[in-house]
Image (cartoon, rainbow, N blue to C red):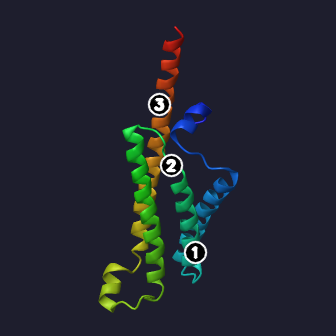
Amino acid sequence: MSNIPNRLQIQTMKQLNKAETILYLLGAVLMVVGSGANVFLQPWAPYVFAAGAIAFVLMQLKQKYEGHNFTLRRLRRILMTSDLFFILSAVLMFANMNNLFGLGAIFYVEYVMNKWVVALLVAAVLQLYATHRIGHELEKEAKRETQADEVAKK
């Protein structure tokens, strides 16, 4: 994605500033630490994961698509769906802590116990797909813009 001209990036995707980028990456690291610690039943893990998920989601929501490409708009909606699954994972982690919400034993075991892993997996797969496709679509759009500029110069 580094070969995309800056003017095209500004036209299509809002870029984060340096502080927002650091917060975005910190959120991702906190989610990894929180989910890894939750596997080892650390009581602080859901708090770390939730803080990371909130930071990650908020910074990702700031990266708005400002163009008219239908494919990129669809991919942004997929990213937003992925963000909802990250938040759902955090809620399920809290629910997984000794049945924190006081659910019935059978309901808890069937619908809540360790289901945060499934929500996190869905979020991660959607995130990987959408970010890969967004990079590819931005490159295609940059090539089209470059070709249009060349044709206009002739």
Closer to the chain start, of discs 1 and 2, is: 1
Residue nearest the viewer, comparing 144 with 14: 14
Label 1: element kind: helix
- Tell me whether circle 3 and circle 1 mark residues in contact (CB < 8 Å): no
Report which quarter residue 23 is drawn in.
bottom right
Label 3: element kind: helix
Give how far across and how far down residue 2 sits, in percent.
61, 35
Q: Using the image, determine if residue 121 lies above or below residue 48.
A: above
Q: Residue under circle 2?
A: 64
Furthest residue to the right? 18
Q: Is residue 20 left or right of residue 60?
A: right
**Residue under the point 43% across and 70% down:** 88
| Alpha carbon distance from label 3 to label 1 | 41 Å
Name the amino acid, label 1. Answer: Ala
Q: Using the image, determine if residue 2 lies above or below residue 33.
A: above
**Residue under the point 34% across and 84% down:** 109
Give neighbour class at mark 2: few <14, some 14-19, many 20+ (Cα, 10 Å): some
**Residue under the point 37% across and 46% down:** 74
Name the amino acid, label 2. Answer: Lys
Closer to the chain start, of discs 3 and 1, is: 1
| Alpha carbon distance from label 3 to label 2 | 17 Å
Q: Is residue 11 left or right of residue 92?
A: right
- Report if residue 3 is visible in the image: no
Q: Residue under circle 3?
A: 141
Name the amino acid, label 3. Answer: Glu
Q: Residue under circle 1?
A: 37
Give how far across and how far down residue 25 sits, in percent.
62, 57
Give how far across and how far down residue 49 sits, in percent.
55, 71
Q: Using the image, determine if residue 143 lies above or below residue 23.
A: above
Residue nearest the viewer, comparing 4 with 97: 4
- Tell me whether circle 1 and circle 2 mark residues in contact (CB < 8 Å): no
